[in-house]
Image (tube, rainbow, N blue to C red):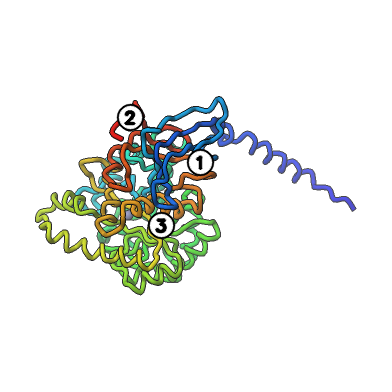
Amino acid sequence: MRQFAPPAVAIMALALTLAAAASPAKAQRPPATAAVVKAGDLFDAEQGRMVGAREILIRGDRIVEVAASVSAPPDATVIDLSQCRVMPGLIDAHTHLLLTQEAGEGLSEVAARDHAVDGDGYRLLTAAQYAREYLEAGITSVRDLGNSGRFLDLVLARAINEGRVAGPRIHGAGPGLAPAGGQMEPLPHDPHGLVDGEYRIIEGVDDARAAVREAVAAGARVIKIYPEATPQRTRLSPEEMTAIVAEARRHDMPVAAHVTSDRGAREAIEAGVTSLEHGYDLSDETLALMAERGVWWVPTHTSFGMARELSSAWPQPPSDQMIRDHLSEEHRRLRKARAAGVRIAAGQDLYAPTAVGRGRASLRVLDAYVEAGLTPAEALQTATLNAGRLLAGEGQLGVIAPGALADLIALPADPTQSLDALAGITLVMKGGRVEVADGSGACASR
Ligand SMILES: [Zn+2]
């Protein structure tokens, strides 16, 4: 017997089909124009080395072919970077674009300023400036992990996606899922709701699942959790974290966990999170467990130069030797993690004002990794291949390979010899569009 769909269902299906055909996303998609980038020398992020001259064929926002010579259509735009070194656009896996915390300021003071004095408009305009600074520094994608008001990170992401302001591709988390009090100093009264303005406070297992769904519905690309909320002494329960991870998995969402203690790290790993952020106290046993379970580590380390600049504003700045002693433990842990096979993605977690701007300053996390013992090429892999896998899975971001998003940067010198080359970026392409160019696009000092 033939089956007929009830008319109401058929009409609904037709309406959905028409709506999909007329969706703004489709209407605004750029035409799939072709471009050929001629690279004088290419950093292959998978191999972790320069592989010589290559041509890169791009169609729309994706890379189509990488070869010594590609067969380009006659109308393809040629971008001649034959005097330059070319590498994938950089990725910072831990940013806070909506947060500016001056030295000595508590997070509750920052929130009071953001909510009662500056307001969301000023906060977003400031974030737009930071976003441009990231892009100008060659950072084409970021994960923005909370302290962004009620989803202001997703507002900024939308404005960037629509071409209204310049910035990196943002994988935003919205407000972090936190235990009572969030990360703020204890606020027994909080009449202005500062905590709820910055965090999604979790109250039980059902609420934990609901919080994930709220973030998904708002457009988040990652879930941020605070297993432990210093300087508060509150903690998410293991049951709440397990529920968050389960709900996030149902929506194909990664979970990033802010951990400072080894205990917090262990509980987050047991709950099944995707990445540990910071990890200032990871024991050797925890590093081994991370390697075994494939848990990512985003070590938000500070380079010596950055530590000295940021601490110079303190009432009693530490001596150089005190800074070195402090950093040496971070260095030991990073070497241990690498030896154990822990997957490491770069993230600077920068929220303090710096002399050189957010983007350039954020690249100093790579200096910190080199100071710890990674080679420059290995450090570059943490901010390309590795961070790309963390954000988008295999082959989508952080590599110059067929099928990947066409994000690349041009430099005058070989970055695998010295990361100083990152200070001279002459061109930034994101999703097949040249977003930043120094005018000549040339790399004269080669
Ligand atoms: Zn952070």
Q: Which residue does the numbered mark 3 point to in the structure image?
A: 224
Q: Quadrant of residue 256?
A: bottom left
In the rendered image of this protein, does residue 255 appear above or below residue 10?
below
Q: Earlier in the sequence, mark 1 or mark 2?
A: 1
Q: Are marks 2 and 3 in contact (CB under 8 Å)?
A: no
State the image coordinates of residue 15 (x, y, percent, origin top left): 69, 39
- Which residue is found at the position 45% from the left and 65% from the top? 294
State the image coordinates of residue 263 (x, y, percent, origin top left): 34, 72
Which element is circle 1 on?
strand
Q: Which mark is residue 66?
A: 1
Amino acid type shown at disc 1: Val
Task: Write down which quadrant ligand 1 falls in.
Answer: bottom left
Q: Which mark is residue 126?
A: none
In the picture, the quarter occupied by the C terminus is top left
In the rendered image of this protein, does residue 406 appear above or below residue 241?
above
Q: Nearer the viewer, mark 1 or mark 2?
A: 1
Within 10 Å of disc 1 (Cα), the crowding (few <14, some 14-19, many 20+) is some
Within 10 Å of disc 3 (Cα), the crowding (few <14, some 14-19, many 20+) is many
